[in-house]
């Protein structure tokens, strides 16, 4: 492919010629703060050759403070539906992105890019696709990985027409990587021809490995495509391309047979990314189209602007280099002065110390109690009492140097930030004042955090475009991760019935993932939780409502950190959900609905008590009614018995009368007398019986 190679060489030459000087400064800045001895590189080091060259690297500490600020305030990506509605697929994308970050150590890529951006002005990382399990031959599932790109200032180049900071408008990109010659020959079986890489700084690096530079060349190819919109009998629209009909020759017949009809067409431009591997002579490998529609290279800048139509960038180091060099020069000179002897030395004639040179030279070490000199004699041989001719002067610190030291120190604090104001907490200083000091220091690093947030957002956009083509297997179990690092799993392309339309849809279908991205910059999860606990503890003292205190206690317990506290967090989460203080997720909502249904099927204890009281009262009423009926029945029975007794008496009288009527007069009289006697016997007192 000679045309591709020639085109790539011309494009790269234009980019490198325009940015060579700027990128050289980026490399020098990173060396200046991170490599020992690099602050004396160049002509300054030649002027101090064979003299003390001290380094008091204050820039390094300032850069590390900004890096630590970022690591304590991680930046996260959040996928949101374009219409603003809640979408479970967006939550799935959030969880999968976090899982891909963890599985590929994406934080290492972010950290490297941020450090290079703060130190030199530009950093980068890449997104690639790889197999989920390289050791399993049967597992063909792929995942997305995030990898660092080292020395981005000398290895990552986007086309000159890309003006956006996130490089989303770039049409091509180069990534230069080095390969040892032996590895190059073994991998490509070709005579090494290195890619022309001119941006480098190797002073103090006395030996460099023999390497071959290769270029990864990414090109955006746009092709027009016609999308046909078909409408079925139910009014639901579907979109198909020419490739869909070519892959399935029965698709057209199926659509017409089911009553679908084409209602319109739409012309779109499909973007694909073509990747090549190039050396200095030829195209080594045509990698074809890669997943996604975006160049998978993410670039982050420290500070960035366009001047004279050239993209320029810098980090936290460049503007402080002169003050740091001046500081080193002053300290080196001051150290040299201090190293000189502070004792006035006598000046002798050669005759006076002849033979005693060793004694005088060793005096600083052996500290002799006295020193010897040779006597001086006159022309007559008489000894003359002659002492030293003169004495040397003790070196003095120039007044200009003392004043310059103070000015230089103040300049470095102005450029790098007065860290001591926040690190040294003075007594009797309010917490509000300390917070204001810390906020002032944080604002010095805010531009780096903001630019990093733009880069992370772009990373999420690239990831989403790749995920639409990678995570498409039906019923594949996909690992996801919650913001609290809890591991879960979802199933891709799981069929489900739409409750509104009754149509069959697929849950967790990444091919339909069209989301907006937002990023949030904030403290790490542990720091956020600790701050939340402190805030809730303070708020509990401001309310006396038991319900509010119960809610705040539950929220505080949910944000506590510690070993073995997960079960307690889960307990308080369920408690707060039942109280209505927090919204349940989908699984918790189902569980809560099942509990409510189970509780609805069981009577309320209070209602049971009221029902029991009602039943008892009804039973008593029924018993009273039965007793009344029984009394009435007994009265009726008594009346019946009385009537029956009276009837029997009348019957007896009648029978007696009849019997008497049949007896003779003497028999009747005897019978009456007998009855009287019996009556008298029955009524006689017991004592007379």
Image (cartoon, rainbow, N blue to C red):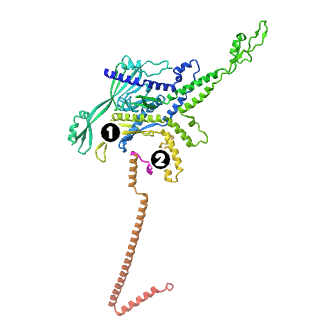
Residue beneath label 1, please? 512
> Badge 2 local density, few (<14 within 10 Å), some, or many (20+)?
some
Q: Position of residue 262 (x, y in %)?
A: 22, 40
Res. 250 in view: yes
Residue beneath label 2, please? 572
Q: Nearer the viewer, residue 294 or 579?
A: 294
Q: Who's the residue at 34% across and 20% down the image?
A: 282
The stretch in magenta equals 572-586
Q: Position of residue 167 (x, y in %)?
A: 39, 31
In the image, residue 584 lies in the stretch drawn in magenta? yes
Which image quadrant for residue 90?
Answer: top left
Q: Is residue 676 left or right of residue 411?
A: left
User: Is residue 76 shown above or below 283?
Assistant: below
User: Is residue 15 shown above or below 376?
Assistant: below
Q: Who's the residue at 21% across and 37% down the image?
A: 252
Decide which of tag 1 and tag 2 comes sooner along the chain: 1
The secondary structure that dominates the magenta segment is: helix
Which image quadrant for residue 497?
Answer: top left
> Badge 1 local density, few (<14 within 10 Å), some, or many (20+)?
few
Q: Secondary structure at mark 1?
A: helix
Q: CA distance from mark 1 to mark 2?
A: 36 Å
Q: Is residue 33 left or right of residue 217?
A: right
């Amino acid at each position: 492919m000679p045309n591709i190679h020639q085109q790539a060489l011309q494009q790269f030459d234009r980019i490198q010629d325009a940015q060579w000087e700027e990128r050289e400064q980026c490399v020098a800045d990173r060396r200046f703060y991170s490599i020992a001895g690099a602050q004396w590189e160049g002509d300054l080091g030649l002027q101090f050759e064979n003299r003390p060259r001290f380094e008091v690297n204050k820039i390094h500490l300032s850069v590390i403070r900004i890096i630590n600020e970022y690591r304590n305030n991680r930046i996260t990506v959040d996928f949101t539906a374009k219409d603003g509605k809640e979408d479970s697929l967006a939550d799935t994308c959030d969880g999968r992105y976090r899982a891909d970050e963890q599985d590929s150590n994406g934080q290492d890529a972010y950290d490297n890019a941020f450090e290079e951006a703060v130190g030199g002005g530009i950093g980068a990382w890449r997104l690639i696709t790889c197999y989920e399990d390289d050791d399993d031959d049967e597992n063909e599932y792929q995942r997305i990985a995030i990898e660092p790109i080292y020395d981005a200032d000398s290895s990552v180049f986007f086309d000159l027409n890309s003006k956006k900071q996130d490089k989303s408008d770039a049409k091509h990109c180069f990534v230069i990587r080095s390969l040892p010659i032996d590895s190059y020959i073994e991998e490509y079986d070709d005579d090494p021809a290195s890619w022309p890489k001119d941006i480098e700084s190797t002073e103090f690096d006395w030996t460099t490995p023999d390497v071959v530079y290769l270029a990864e060349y990414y090109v955006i190819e746009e092709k027009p495509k016609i999308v046909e919109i078909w409408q079925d009998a139910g009014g639901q629209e579907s979109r198909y391309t020419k490739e869909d009909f070519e892959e399935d020759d029965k698709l057209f017949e199926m659509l017409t047979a089911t009553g679908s009809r084409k209602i319109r067409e739409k012309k779109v431009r499909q973007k694909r990314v073509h990747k090549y591997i190039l050396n200095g002579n030829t195209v080594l490998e045509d990698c074809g189209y890669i997943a996604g529609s975006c160049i998978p290279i993410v670039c982050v800048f420290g500070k960035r602007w366009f001047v004279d139509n050239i993209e320029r960038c810098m980090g936290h180091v460049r503007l402080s280099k002169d003050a740091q060099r001046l500081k080193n020069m002053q300290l080196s000179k001051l150290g040299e002065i201090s190293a000189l002897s502070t004792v006035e030395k006598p000046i002798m004639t050669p005759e006076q110390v002849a033979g005693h040179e060793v004694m005088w030279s060793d005096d600083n070490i052996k500290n002799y109690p006295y020193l010897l000199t040779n006597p001086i004699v006159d022309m007559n041989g008489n000894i003359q009492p002659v002492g030293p001719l003169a004495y040397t002067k003790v070196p003095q610190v120039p007044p200009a140097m003392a004043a310059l030291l103070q000015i230089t120190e103040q300049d470095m604090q102005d450029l790098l930030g007065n860290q001591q104001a926040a690190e040294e907490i003075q007594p009797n200083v309010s917490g509000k004042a300390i917070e204001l000091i810390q906020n002032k220091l944080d604002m010095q690093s805010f531009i780096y955090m903001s630019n990093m947030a733009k880069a992370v957002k772009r990373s999420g956009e690239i990831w989403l475009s790749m995920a639409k083509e990678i995570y498409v297997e039906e019923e594949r179990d996909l690992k996801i991760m919650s913001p609290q690092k809890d591991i879960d799993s979802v199933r891709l392309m799981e069929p489900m019935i739409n409750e509104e339309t009754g149509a069959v849809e697929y849950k967790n279908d990444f091919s339909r993932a069209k989301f907006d991205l937002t990023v949030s910059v904030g403290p790490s999860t542990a720091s956020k939780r600790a701050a939340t606990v402190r805030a809730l503890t303070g708020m509990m003292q401001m309310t006396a409502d038991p319900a509010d205190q119960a809610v705040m206690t539950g929220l505080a317990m949910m944000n506590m950190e510690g070993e073995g506290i997960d079960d307690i967090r889960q307990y308080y989460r369920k408690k707060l959900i039942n109280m209505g203080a927090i919204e349940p997720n989908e699984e918790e909502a189902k569980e809560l609905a099942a509990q409510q249904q189970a509780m609805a099927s069981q009577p309320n204890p209070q209602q049971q008590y009221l029902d029991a009281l009602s039943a008892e009262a009804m039973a008593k009423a029924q018993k009273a009614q039965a007793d009344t009926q029984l009394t009435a029945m007994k009265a009726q029975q008594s009346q019946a018995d009385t009537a029956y007794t009276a009837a029997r008496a009348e019957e007896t009288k009648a029978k007696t009368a009849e019997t008497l009527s049949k007896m003779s007069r003497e028999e009747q009289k005897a019978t009456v007398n007998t009855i009287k006697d019996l009556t008298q016997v029955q009524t006689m007192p017991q004592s007379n019986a």
